[in-house]
Amino acid sequence: THVPLYAYYALSILGYECPWKIMLTALQIAQFVVCATHALYCAGADNYPMPLLVLNVFVQVNMLILFGHFCCTAYRVRREQRT
């Protein structure tokens, strides 16, 4: 996830419009889902300290909410402007 993310940052600094920005946001959302799923798996396997797993799931859920809200508001506006 970080390689495309930093490529996007580099393009933005250079003044280029990034055509795959929506896909990058979707990739980040998928990363949060995978990380939360991994934390829940580790909780079930009982092979990691539970307070850290709870914190991890809390962070991942918050990131899902924040990025989901960003995705809905930022890209919905673009779609409505095109029509």
Image (spheres, grey):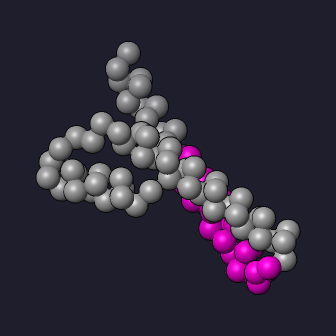
Quarter of the view holding residue 78:
top left
Q: Which quadrant of the structure image shows residue 47?
A: bottom right
Classify 67 as above or below 39: above
- Asked if 41 appears above or below 50 in the picture, the reply is above
Q: Position of residue 18 (x, y in %)?
A: 27, 42
Q: Is residue 72 magenta?
A: no
- Residue 71: percent from left, percent from top: 49, 42
Q: Nearer the viewer, residue 16 or 46?
A: 46
Q: Is residue 69 magenta?
A: yes
Q: How many marks?
A: 0
Up-down relation of residue 54 to residue 40 (above or below):
below
**Residue sitting nearer the eye, 66 or 26:** 26
At x 28%, y 54%, the residue is 7
Residue at 71%, 59% in the rendered image: 37
Whether residue 41 is visible to the viewer of this picture, yes or no, is: yes
The residue nearer to you, when weighing 14 against 65, is 14
Quarter occupied by the C terminus: top left
Magenta range: 47-70
Q: Position of residue 69 (x, y in %)?
A: 54, 46
**In the displayed structure image, the side of residue 39 where residue 19 appears, left or right:** left
Q: Front-most of 67 and 2?
A: 2
The vertical placement of 45 against 74, above or below, is below
Residue at 36% across, 53% down: 4
Q: Quadrant of residue 51?
A: bottom right
Residue 49: x percent and y percent? 76, 84
